[in-house]
Image: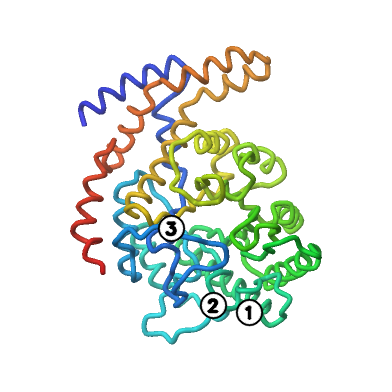
Amino acid sequence: MAALKERYEIAKEAYRAMGVDTDRALEELKKIPISLHCWQGDDVIGFDGAGSLSGGIQTTGNYPGKARTPEELMADIDKVLSLVPGRHRVNLHASYAIFGDSQWVDRDRIEPKHFRKWVEFAKERGLGLDFNPTCFSHPKAEFGTLSSENPEVRRFWIDHCIACLRISEYFAEELGTPATMNIWIPDGFKDIPGDRTASRARLKDSLDQILASGYDRSKVNVAVESKVFGIGMESMTVGSHEFYMNYAAKNDILCLLDNGHYHPTEAVSDKISSMLLFFDKVALHVTRGVRWDSDHVVLFDDETREIAKEIVRNGADRVLLALDFFDASINRIAAWTVGMRSMEKALLYALLQPNRELAELQEKRDFTKLMMLMEELKCYPFGDVWNYYCEINGVPAKEDWYPAVMDYEKEVLSKRA
């Protein structure tokens, strides 16, 4: 601790000369929760009997030790949170219902009681919960969900989303913090469609019915998430960015941006400021697409840092931040931990920028000094500030967290058949 503190004090002075208060940055970082996605731990399978993935989603790899039960998944989440500084949230999909002694019901009839154990888990740890209807990996999702031509199928998914609203309200009431409920559907067409309008009109009507069911806006932030394409819907997705951005604006709900859901040359970091000029808040899923929406583990890379800068510069309280990736080719606990720590590092990096001075240089069109400063800041002792933050939050600094994951693999994960 003494060595880390000493290095921190040196870093503190370096940043102070640049006009940055590192103590304040660390306090601000504590206030930014990240919603940890539960589905990294079991390859997006869930507990409601789906068994396998469908709907344009793929998890590649077969690393041993994935969670098979709610108890195993909760234990894995505990391990991750013990290695990540700060107080965060957990993001659930509806397919993670825990029926226990209750009779199994289909997704259109799930109730708050099927998530009671998740609420108990969150309450004991001081966590918030977020939620997602699971409109994939189900027989009734094979030919569309909220945009389906089949009225019976469409009714099923409308009822599912309404049920999810009730569960989201339950989370907020029990935990004292609003829940974000995000709607994503895999509806689309593999080849060039003959009619793009009809399916989108049905999606609009379905969403209208879901919102008309009523919910407490002080407790639930409803978001809609677009996607440019997926496996089996390469030519058109019904829920495009333009559709959802306009729908969200018209109905005063959130538009959720997933940085893996756009064309490779598009950057979500460039979209955040525009969205926040017209929306009070925006929701994000941070991932890492490699050539396409492949949901690789989030890293401390250029785009993650740029996203974090925009979050900080536009007001972190206006951005509902979650991660979304699933990698079954590596240790899942390590994947989670790398992703969470990388996102936090990016946020700290953004908080350690002399953002006011950088903005002033841009206003004066002094692009030479602006570029020079941004490049020189890359070599400032950011790592010493990060390591100190880990230390004061009681989690391992540097790579010292990794042996704990390997011990967990040896003692717990390797024993899962």
Q: Residue at x 26, y 41 (%)?
A: 396
Residue on which the image places disc 2: 107
Q: Tell me if mark 1 has few (under 14), some (14-19) or many (20+) residues whose alpha carbon lies within 10 angstroms of its own.
A: some
Q: Looking at the image, is mark 1 or mark 2 earlier in the sequence?
A: 2
Looking at the image, which is closer to me, 308 or 336? 336
Residue 2, by quadrant, is top left
**232 with respect to 207 (left or right):** left
Secondary structure of the residue carrying tag 2 is helix
Q: Secondary structure at mark 1?
A: helix
Give residue 263's position: percent from left, percent from top: 64, 45
- Mark 3 to mark 2: distance in Å? 26 Å
Whether tag 1 and tag 2 are in contact, CB under 8 A, the answer is yes
Secondary-structure class at tag 3: loop
Residue matched to label 1:
156
Task: Tell me which corner region of the image, top left, top right, bottom left or bottom right, holds residue 62.
Answer: bottom left
Dot 3 amino acid type: Thr
Which numbered disc, 3 or 2, marks the residue that appears first in the sequence? 3
Residue at image point 69% right, 52% down: 241
Image location of residue 50, percent across then percent down: 47, 75
Tag 1: amino acid: Phe
User: Dot 3: within a 10 Å radius of its alpha carbon, few (fewer than 14), some, or many (20 or more) residues?
Assistant: few
| Rendered residue at 40%/27% (across/down) | 22
Vertical arrangement, residue 129 with respect to residue 32, above or below: below
Residue that numbered label 3 is attached to: 60
* Amino acid type assigned to the residue bearing label 2 in the image: Arg
Q: Earlier in the sequence, mark 1 or mark 3?
A: 3
